[in-house]
Amino acid sequence: MQQTYGFAPAHSFPFMFFGFFGILLTILVLTPYWFIFKKAGFSPFLSLLMFIPLINIVALYFLAFARWNVVPTPPAYPTAPVPYPPQV
């Protein structure tokens, strides 16, 4: 009879299961903050601060009260012309 040491493939399944969902949860949490920081005009890498306890709260307050460096976009459609010239 062969004796094995360590983890058998059946024993490593829970680790793979929780590892997969850990990566999936990380992506689900990181993606919105990535786009929020990018749209606010900051480096999107600041979204990585959301995984550090207490720093994430400071980062959210910074984001909430900071001046966003956003350039206004031009209107999608031009304004409608005046139907009649103004009376003088």
Image (cartoon, grey):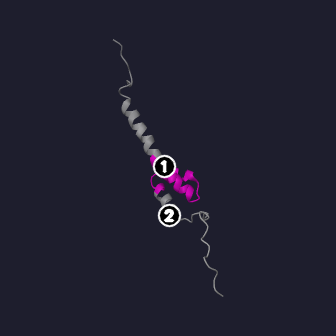
Tell me if 53 is positioned left or right of 74 in this view: left
* Residue 53 coordinates in the image, percent (x, y): 45, 52
* Helix, strand or loop for disc 1: helix
Residue furthest to the front: 84
Residue furthest to the bottom: 88
Tell me if 44 is positioned left or right of 57 in this view: right
Q: Main secondary structure of the magenta part?
A: helix
| 4 w.r.t. 82: above or below | above
What residue is drawn where x is 54% and y is 65%?
Answer: 66
User: Quick check: marks 2 and 1 in contact, CB under 8 Å?
Assistant: no
Q: Residues within 10 Å of mark 2 (few under 14, many from 20)?
A: few
What residue is drawn where x is 53% and y is 53%?
Answer: 35
Sequence-wise, the earlier of marks 2 and 1 is 1
Magenta stretch: includes residue 43: yes
| Magenta residues, start to end | 28-56
Q: Amino acid at mark 2?
A: Ala
Q: Which of 3 and 88 lies nearest the eye of the viewer?
A: 88
Q: Which of 44 and 8 lies nearest the eye of the viewer?
A: 44
Report, in whole angstroms, how far the alpha carbon at label 2 lies from the one at label 1. Answer: 17 Å
* Residue 5 coordinates in the image, percent (x, y): 38, 21
Looking at the rendering, in which quadrant would you find the N terminus?
A: top left
| 83 w.r.t. 44: above or below | below
Return the mark for residue 51. none
Residue furthest to the top: 1
Return the mark for residue 64. 2
* Helix, strand or loop for disc 2: helix
Q: Residues within 10 Å of mark 1 (few under 14, many from 20)?
A: some
Magenta stretch: includes residue 39: yes
Q: Amino acid at mark 1?
A: Leu
Return the mark for residue 30. 1
